[in-house]
């Protein structure tokens, strides 16, 4: 029982990272029908910018590591990556919107390779580690619940992930801009007739998605301590899978898909074998897609605006 | 750019190589270096380059074969097998006379087929998978030692530690899987019970599910045969989960970066089975090399594999001098038969057997100290 509970906690932690990154894929797909393959690499870039900010604030400027500093780091990184997201949209995607659906996907792959190599050249092809100083931000507390261990760090990471996801959900469902965003995802032309500035909404999606991905990057850096320039590929692939699993274009779907994928992986490892984990996870994915071709929650929930 | 500039520029481009050739004394001898200069194992690849450049400089002071110089042609295989084949073809067509490389067994395996077909002498500094030398390639050598010796050493060491139930974890790479299988076999022969034998996926960053599973099976010790980036994470997450077994890791974790990744608290007390560290290698040649390296780069060579790359090159040069030729077949013949007791920078090289494997063994157990240093277990 303790084993099962521990694997559940392990899986939820892994899954919350997938979910956070999956949101970026799903939002862009929702409004543009474009799979933004560069999203995983924006996430990775976030982890690196987070490291630089952390070094700058804590190590160079001698600020003591506190919750306030942690918050500042998240804000700075999210803003920086949001800017990168806007530039990416302007340079790599906007010129191609009229060219059909495939050219922007190819452009996205190109952008992914560009970001990955740029990071490799800027920061070197070595593993980077978040310095020990950050540990003081979150004190090392570990609880034992029913034979399973959960650390304060894990709780903080889960909490940040859920706050960000809930915030996004509320924003999209209950604000005017959020409503406009949903309208754009239904039909660009009709939305434009209703007086919505479609390009502004698209730009906004490219602010929010990358910012959430960047937050995920900082969290992975803080939690696992080790980052690498190909990090985006592995996480990006899993997050993309999570988005499909939940129903691409659907925000709650991405959250559920991410958490579910994490838990399936953990249980597959725990009760079968780690070497078979990915095979099992993808078999489950295929079965779910056979049963529900548009993902668990469906590609888009039909609704009245 | 206006035409005014184009003409001189073209002239410059055309004439520069000619100028370089003008005082051509004697043609230099090209030797290939295939290494993961970028990618996952870039740390080792960069070290190969540093060591090979140092050794090349020393050799070129005197020159070989009547004052000819050696020239290193580098190729980056990124640590990936497909890139490795490209690299091998590239070096073959560049006309190298012999090759040092590559780092991982996964890369050395496909490259060795290509070098073999091209009839080139290849010496790998660090690929220890047993099956590499089982293919009957006459010109394939290694200056490192085989996995199965390390597996035997690891099994006996765990028994000495008093372990009865053990786990063995690898990462599905050619090298780590080989080492894990040998360790498992020798452990069972030594009377230990192997409760889990599984592989992690090196692309992952979260290994808590498998650690939870291992801990549930209650082994006394777990042997990890993979590489240090994953080793560091395993140690770190193992501590976070509060697992109750001892970690013993293989020689691919013999790298200070592992402690950096895991954090000191998680690393200390971990055992490592490995060839001795550069600073612990016996012999005057080895000590002089260590000092030369520190003098040139202001840091000690971080991993044994860097130093092995130095010996791979030195053995090639030695073979060229002894046979007075750059013919791979002659050099290989010499290395198989006459090459004996050569004072290497990795200690004495007794010689090579008929498969091209280095004779003898040097494995030692290290423990990570309170200060995060690797200390030899006596």
Image (cartoon, coloured by chain):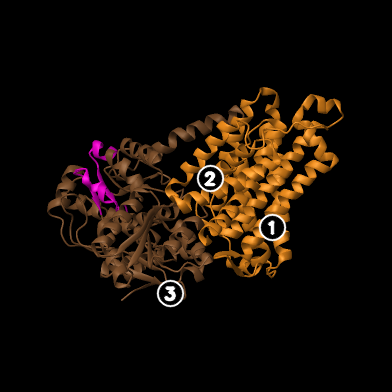
Chain letter, disc 2 residue: A
Q: Kindly state the secondary structure of the residue where label 1 is placed.
A: helix
Question: In the rendered image, which residue does mark 3 sit on?
Answer: B369
Residue A223 in picture, x, y percent from top left: 59, 59
Give the numbered dot on residue A173. Answer: none
Disc 2 and disc 3: Cα gap in Å? 34 Å
| Drawn side of residue B129 relative to residue A119, left or right | left
Q: Is residue A70 visible?
A: yes
Taking the view exactly as shown, the residue that stands out farthest to the right is: A195
Q: Give the residue at mark 2.
A: A234
Assess disc 3: are there few (<14), some (14-19) or many (≥20) residues with their C-alpha within 10 Å of its C-alpha: some
Residue at numbered disc 1: A159
Query: How far from the left and from the top, in percent, is residue B249?
Result: 38, 63
Question: In this rendering, is residue A131 above or below A185?
Answer: below
Chain coloured brown in this rendering: B
Residue range (magenta): B114-142
Count numbered badges in the picture: 3
Residue B131 magenta-drawn? yes
- Where residue B4 appears, x then y in whole percent? 59, 29
């Amino acid at each position: 029982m303790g084993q099962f509970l521990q694997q559940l906690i392990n899986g939820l932690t892994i899954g919350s990272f997938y979910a956070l990154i999956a949101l970026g894929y799903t939002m862009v797909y929702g409004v543009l029908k474009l799979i933004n393959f560069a999203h995983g690499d924006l996430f990775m870039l976030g982890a690196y910018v987070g490291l630089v900010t952390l070094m700058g604030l804590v190590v160079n400027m001698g600020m003591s590591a506190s919750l306030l500093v942690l918050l500042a780091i998240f804000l700075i990184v999210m803003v920086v990556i949001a800017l990168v997201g806007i530039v990416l949209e302007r340079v790599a995607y906007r010129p191609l919107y009229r060219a059909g659906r495939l050219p922007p996907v190819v452009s996205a792959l190109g952008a992914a390779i560009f970001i990955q190599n740029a990071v490799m050249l800027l920061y070197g092809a070595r593993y980077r580690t978040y310095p020990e100083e950050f540990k003081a931000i979150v004190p090392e507390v570990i609880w034992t619940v029913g034979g399973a261990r959960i650390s304060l760090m894990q709780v903080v990471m889960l909490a940040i992930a859920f706050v960000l996801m809930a915030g996004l959900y509320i924003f999209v469902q209950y604000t005017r801009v959020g409503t406009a965003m949903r309208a754009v995802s239904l039909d660009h032309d009709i939305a434009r007739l209703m007086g919505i500035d479609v390009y502004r909404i698209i730009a906004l999606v490219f602010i929010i998605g990358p910012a959430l991905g960047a937050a995920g990057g900082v969290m992975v850096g803080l939690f696992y301590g080790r980052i690498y320039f190909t990090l985006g590929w592995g996480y990006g692939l899993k997050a993309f899978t999570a988005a499909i699993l939940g129903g691409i274009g659907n925000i709650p779907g991405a959250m559920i898909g991410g958490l579910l994928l994490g838990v399936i992986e953990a249980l597959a490892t725990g009760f079968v074998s780690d070497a078979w984990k990915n095979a099992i996870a993808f078999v489950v994915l295929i079965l779910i897609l056979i049963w529900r071709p548009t993902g668990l929650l469906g590609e888009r929930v039909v609704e009245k605006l | 750019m206006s035409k005014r500039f184009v003409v001189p520029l073209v002239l410059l481009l055309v004439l520069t190589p000619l100028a370089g050739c003008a005082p051509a004394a004697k043609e230099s001898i090209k030797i290939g270096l295939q290494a993961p200069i970028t990618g996952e194992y870039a740390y080792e690849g960069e070290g190969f380059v540093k060591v090979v450049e140092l050794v090349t400089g020393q050799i070129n002071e005197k020159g070989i074969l009547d004052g000819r110089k050696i020239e290193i042609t580098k190729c980056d295989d990124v640590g990936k097998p497909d890139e490795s084949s490209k690299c091998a073809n590239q070096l073959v067509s560049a006309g190298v006379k012999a090759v040092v490389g590559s780092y991982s067994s996964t890369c050395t395996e496909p490259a060795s087929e290509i070098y073999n077909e091209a009839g080139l002498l290849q010496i790998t500094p660090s690929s220890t998978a047993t099956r590499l030398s089982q293919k009957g390639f006459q010109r394939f050598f290694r200056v490192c030692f085989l996995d199965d010796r390390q597996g035997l050493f690891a099994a006996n060491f765990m028994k000495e530690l008093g372990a009865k139930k053990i786990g063995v974890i690898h990462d599905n790479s050619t090298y780590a899987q080989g080492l894990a299988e040998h360790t498992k076999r020798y452990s069972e022969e030594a009377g230990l019970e192997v409760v889990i034998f599984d592989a992690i996926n090196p692309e992952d960053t979260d290994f808590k599910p498998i650690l939870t599973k291992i801990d549930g099976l209650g082994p006394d010790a777990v042997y990890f045969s993979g590489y240090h980036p994953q080793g560091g994470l395993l140690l770190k997450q193992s501590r976070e989960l509060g697992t109750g077994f001892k970690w013993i890791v293989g020689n691919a974790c013999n790298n200070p970066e592992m402690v950096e990744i895991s954090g000191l608290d998680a690393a200390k007390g971990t055992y490592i089975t490995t060839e001795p560290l550069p600073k612990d290698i016996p012999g005057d040649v080895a000590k002089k090399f260590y000092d030369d390296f520190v003098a040139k780069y202001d840091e000690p060579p971080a991993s044994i594999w860097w130093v092995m790359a130095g010996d791979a090159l030195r053995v090639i040069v030695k073979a060229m001098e002894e046979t007075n030729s750059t013919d791979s077949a002659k050099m290989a013949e010499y290395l198989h038969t006459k090459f004996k007791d050569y004072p290497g920078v990795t200690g004495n090289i007794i010689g090579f057997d008929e498969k091209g494997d280095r004779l003898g063994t040097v494995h030692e157990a290290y423990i990570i100290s309170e200060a995060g240093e690797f200390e030899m277990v006596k």
